[in-house]
Every structure is written in structure tokens, then in C-alpha cells.
Image (cartoon, rainbow, N blue to C red):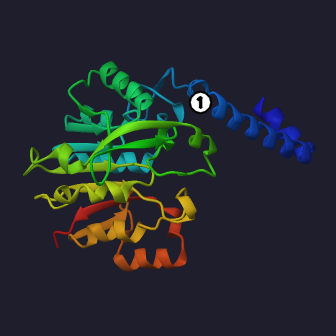
Amino acid sequence: MRTIRRGLSRLFPHTARRYKRFRNAAYLRCFEMFPTLASALREYGQGAHKKHRSSIGMDLVGPSELIECGYESEELELVKQKLQGVEVFVDVGANIGLYTCLAASEGRRVVAIEPLASNLRYLYQNLMGNKLDQVEVFPLGLASTPSLSVLAGMGAQASFLADWAKEDYGHNKFIGTVCPSSTLDIVLGTRFSGKRLLIKMDVEGFEFQVLQGASATLNMSPKPIWIIECFLDRFHPGGKNANFLATFNMFFDRGYRAHVAEVNGAEVTRNTVEHWVKQGAVDGMASNFIFTPDIS
């Protein structure tokens, strides 16, 4: 069917463009009128109701695009490597639990933080289905201070930033869920003092605000390793992340070093980040970075 559609698009390009505009408008209208039903149908179309064999060797439920081989392969390999040197894994924005399940299966103590109810449903199934029920799960969001906030959108694209990725996921504006938020410092407290932590953060553009509520965690001894998704010129309202440099400076000012989040990823210095901000784009379009304590 997909091959036929592509062939017709090449033969009748103007008709294909009109049809695409009509289809997109109808799609958005469905989310506007029936957001709950439209969300459920979208998840069903993504195969979220079925188990999929994941790249970490487990059967997981959730949207197939977030599970099957090839998804974030570089980041998964890096996490596998870094897990060998830590005792606790903290998954901020755990989603359906791919990284949480990986870390728990490696015998690490895991704290998973996820605010969205639909994601939590898959997360719980994946933990129970793989006998990983010792994971601590916090069903809330993180911010600079405790609050109630509206989480816009669904699935992996949900964000506490209004108008996040509106050009790519326009239907998100019709889906809003009120969620409690706390801070990372409150969630972790002092119970992991002296432990080696690996913190993965994927919060769809809200990382600066989360880090504002994590000053004690940033200054722990030993300092944690952080792997963070952080876009400069994509998805952010207005087209630019106004806190991109400030996010990196939070780490540089505390004696961390930064690299692209790949095994043997290139180093990212303060000058590098300032250059990216000035030119308005990240070289190589990197969006995941690892911050490690500078022990030199």
C-alpha cells in the first residue's frame, strides 16, 4: 500500500499535496474534537498494545518505534558502558522504560521518574513482565520548584513547555494533563550520598528547569554522570533554546566535562557551545550529551 501511495504521489504531485494537507487538517480536527479517542487510536496505530522484541533483549510493550532495534542505538550503547561504573541509575523522563529496564536488568538500583499516565501504564507492564519490580517509580514531573503543571502532548513528545514541537506534533496542543511536579533534589534527597550515580534526562526541552531544582545533586560527592537530551535549534518555541548555553554552563561551572553522547564522542567545550549558539545550530546536529566529572 505504501509503495502504491508513493507511486501515485510521483504521478500526481499536486493532487498528492492537496490530499496530504486535507489529511493533516482532518487529523488535527480529530484531536481537537476527540483528544482521548484520537490519542488511543494513534497509540494503537503505533503498535503500543503489542509486545516488541527490543534491542536490549527483552519483550516490551509501547510504541514500536521506541523499542525495536536501531532506536537510540548510540545512546543505549553508551549507557550500557557507563552502567558498569555506577551503583544507581536515575531515569528522568523514563517514558515506557527502555533505559530503566536495561539498568535494572544489569543489577543496578533504579529510580524512574515519569509524569504521563499512558507512559506509566507501559512502564509498569514492562517492569512487571520482565520481573524487574524492585525499581522505584515516581509518577510525577520535575521542575525548579514543586508545583502543579500542565503536560502538553502524548507519548515521547509530551512536554511541560507550551508549544513544544508544534510544527512537528501540532496535535499536542489539544492534549493537556495536569501533573504534580517536584524537584530532583527532593526526590533523591541525601540517601545516595557517597554512591556513584548515572542520571539520564529526556524531558523534551525542560532540562534547564529540571536542573534548576537539582543543585544539590549536581554538587554531590562523587559527582554523578549525566546524559541529557538538549536541542538548540529544533522543537523549541520560537525556534531556539534560549537556555542552551546556560544549561552547559551549569556543568562547566561545577567542574564537569562534556562530550557528544556516543561511545568515544567528541568533546564539547564552553567555546564549542558558544560557537554553536552564535551560528544558530549544533555541528553534526547532535542533541544528546554526556557530562562527566573532570578528574584531571
Residue 134 x, y percent position in the rendering: 20, 27
Q: Residue at image x 24%, y 24%?
A: 133
Question: Quadrant of the rendered structure where residue 150 is?
Answer: top left
Q: Image height check: is 36 above or below 147?
A: above
Q: In the image, 249: left or right of 69?
A: left
**From this viewpoint, is residue 263 visible?**
no
Q: In the image, 167: left or right of 294?
A: right
In the rendered image, the quadrant that contains the N terminus is top right
Residue 124 x, y percent position in the rendering: 34, 24
Question: Quadrant of the rendered structure where residue 293 is?
Answer: bottom left
Q: Nearer the viewer, residue 132 or 233?
A: 233
Label 1 sits on a secondary structure element that is helix
Q: Nearer the viewer, residue 99 or 188?
A: 188
Q: Image height check: is 222 above or below 273?
A: above
* Residue type at numbered disc 1: Pro
| Residue topped by disc 1 | 35
Residue 105 x, y percent position in the rendering: 26, 32
Residue 58 x, y percent position in the rendering: 38, 27
